[in-house]
Image (tube, grey):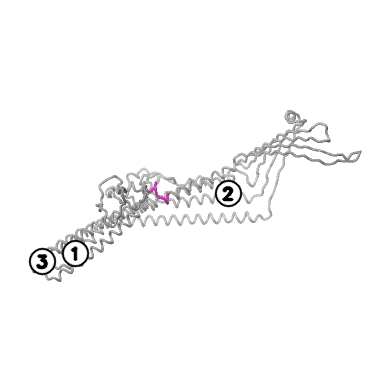
């Protein structure tokens, strides 16, 4: 747990992946191109990474569905708590009977009118104790008697389980299991939220890359067109043969194809980003997006990989869900152990009864010496009890399986984190390497162009140099986007993405072992 506290204390100073401050866009923003239709009155939406994340957490439809699960699961807690709620039941009956009775003169009619009313308060306690208080009133008016007969009784009954059903732990097991399921749904919501945030950041940087790629291809197209104009001038003055024009024309055609693909890719990434953030208003897919965040590579400092593994073993939502499943199995084990016991209940009933000709006087007569008392023990045990034994063995096997699955999952989590850490390191090194490649390709193009102008090179070699520069420019930007996405993926796989983005969500704390 100390590792978790250390992580949270240093999280603001740790790698945040991107700067979430409003700033000039790192990637130049391309204007809307002809294929994009913007509805009248639909203004562009300006987004930082933080804005995109918060908007998605508020508006994403998939997340809005997932957010209801903990609330739904909480109703099962209330349902289990209701077992211990006191209950009251009341009954009132009126009966009339006419029959015959035999006497010394023969048979005579017998009329009886009865009235009964009762009320019972009952409560079940987690100790396995059932307490009930009962009030009962009976009135009988019979032709056998000159006066009506009435009785009132107040009684107290207590039943205590001595073996099966005894103790707070077994009787609260269902409630605690329901609470664990609620906690598990919170971890599930946290994991889903981290996935949404990760997808938003991926889409954000993919869109930035797509726009930058359009700019690079457009500049490369302009360069190829400029080369064509120079070639045409040199052909006019007789310095080059007309066949040299083919290479420049082919380069222009290739750039135009790449520009079509780049624009299509940008539109697809724009739609994916809008789907994730789901901005309010009608026709969200027709809104243009202006990106305002830029990478802040200087602030990114990663801990040694062991530190990230340690955080993941504490904060990964799927790990915490697996731990809760083991706690739930432990509670199930308590229940099945109790089911192996025979049932033996002790019960006692005490009552006071008063008699009179009406309800009021009968209540007053209950202060006399008369009373009733009953006490006993009830025992019940099925021979073999094979059903309970089979259930207990099944729970033991499920618990063993869950523990082994947790160990396997912990190993997979460590593998995920270590693999993601290697990818972060690789992609960061690729930034430096791709920048160096781009600079060398720029110089190669400059040299090849100068050689062409003095007649020592060909348009084919110049076009090839232009192509190499285009690829290295795109590769440089892609390396940066890949690095930012690799960071996001690392933080998601260690379960700290929401924490690092300053987002407070359920499931922030690991399971409490005391729940076991």
Q: Can residue 148 be seen in the rendering of this structure?
A: yes
Give the residue drawn at x 16%, y 60%: 443
Describe the element under mark 3 as helix, strand or loop: helix
Q: Tell me the crowding category of disc 2: few under 14, some 14 to 19, or many 20 or more residues within 10 angstroms, Cα based.
A: some
Q: Earlier in the sequence, mark 3 or mark 2?
A: 3
* Disc marking residue 156: none
Tell which of 275 and 427 is nearer to you. Answer: 275
Q: Earlier in the sequence, mark 3 or mark 1?
A: 3
Magenta stretch: helix, strand or loop mostly: helix
Residue 384 position, x and y percent, is: 67, 56
Compared across the picture, whether 146 is left or right of 515 comes to right
On screen, residue 461 above or below 193: below
Alpha-carbon span between mark 3 and mark 2: 92 Å
> Mark 3 near mark 1, Cβ–Cβ under 8 Å?
no
Which callout, 3 or 2, points to the residue nearer the camera? 3
Q: Mark 3 points at which residue?
A: 234
Compared across the picture, whether 32 is left or right of 170 comes to left
Q: Mark 1 points at which residue?
A: 465
Describe the element under mark 2 as helix, strand or loop: helix
Which callout, 2 or 1, points to the residue nearer the camera? 1
């Amino acid at each position: 747990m100390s590792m978790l506290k250390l992580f949270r204390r240093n999280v603001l100073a740790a790698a945040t992946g991107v700067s979430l401050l409003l700033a000039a866009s790192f990637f130049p923003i391309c204007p809307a191109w002809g294929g994009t239709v913007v509805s009248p009155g639909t203004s562009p939406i300006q987004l930082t990474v933080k804005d995109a994340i918060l908007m998605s957490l508020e508006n994403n439809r998939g997340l809005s569905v997932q957010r209801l699960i903990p609330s739904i699961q909480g109703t099962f807690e209330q349902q289990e708590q209701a077992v211990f709620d006191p209950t009251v039941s009341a009954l009132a009956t009126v009966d009339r009977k006419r029959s015959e009775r035999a006497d010394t003169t023969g048979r005579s009619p017998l009329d009886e009118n009865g009235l009964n009313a009762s009320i019972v308060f009952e409560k079940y306690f987690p100790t396995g104790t059932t307490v009930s208080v009962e009030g009962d009133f009976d009135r009988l008016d019979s032709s056998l008697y000159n006066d009506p007969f009435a009785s009132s009784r107040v009684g107290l009954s207590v039943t205590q389980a001595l073996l099966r059903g005894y103790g707070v732990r077994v009787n609260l097991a269902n409630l605690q299991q329901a609470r664990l399921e609620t906690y598990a749904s919170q971890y599930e919501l946290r994991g889903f939220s981290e996935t949404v945030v990760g997808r938003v950041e991926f889409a954000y940087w993919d869109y930035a890359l797509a726009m930058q790629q359009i700019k690079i291809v457009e500049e490369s197209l302009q360069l190829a067109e400029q080369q064509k104009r120079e070639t045409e001038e040199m052909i006019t003055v007789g310095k080059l043969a007309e066949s040299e024009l083919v290479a420049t024309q082919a380069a222009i055609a290739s750039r135009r194809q790449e520009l079509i693909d780049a624009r299509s890719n940008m539109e697809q990434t724009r739609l994916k980003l809008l789907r994730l953030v789901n901005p309010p208003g009608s026709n969200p897919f027709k809104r243009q997006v202006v990106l305002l965040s830029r990478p802040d590579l200087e602030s990114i400092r990663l801990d040694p990989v062991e530190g990230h593994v340690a955080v993941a073993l504490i904060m990964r939502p799927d790990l915490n869900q697996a731990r809760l499943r083991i706690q739930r199995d432990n509670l199930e084990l308590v229940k099945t152990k109790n089911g192996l016991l025979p049932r033996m209940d002790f019960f006692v009933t005490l009552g006071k009864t008063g008699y009179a000709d009406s309800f009021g006087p009968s209540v007053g007569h209950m202060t006399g010496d008369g009373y009733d008392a009953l006490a006993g023990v009830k025992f019940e045990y099925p021979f073999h009890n094979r059903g309970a034994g089979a259930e207990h063995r099944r729970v033991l096997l499920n618990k063993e399986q869950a523990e082994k699955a947790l160990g396997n999952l912990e190993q997979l989590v460590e593998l995920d984190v270590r693999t993601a850490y290697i990818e972060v390191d690789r992609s960061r090194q690729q930034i430096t390497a791709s920048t160096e490649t781009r600079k060398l390709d720029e110089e190669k193009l400059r040299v090849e162009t100068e050689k062409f102008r003095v007649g020592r090179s060909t348009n084919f070699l110049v076009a090839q140099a232009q192509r190499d520069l285009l690829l290295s420019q795109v590769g440089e930007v892609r390396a940066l986007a890949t690095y930012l996405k690799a960071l996001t993926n690392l933080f998601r796989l260690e379960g700290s993405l929401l924490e690092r983005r300053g987002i407070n969500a359920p499931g922030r704390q690991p399971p409490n072992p005391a729940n076991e």
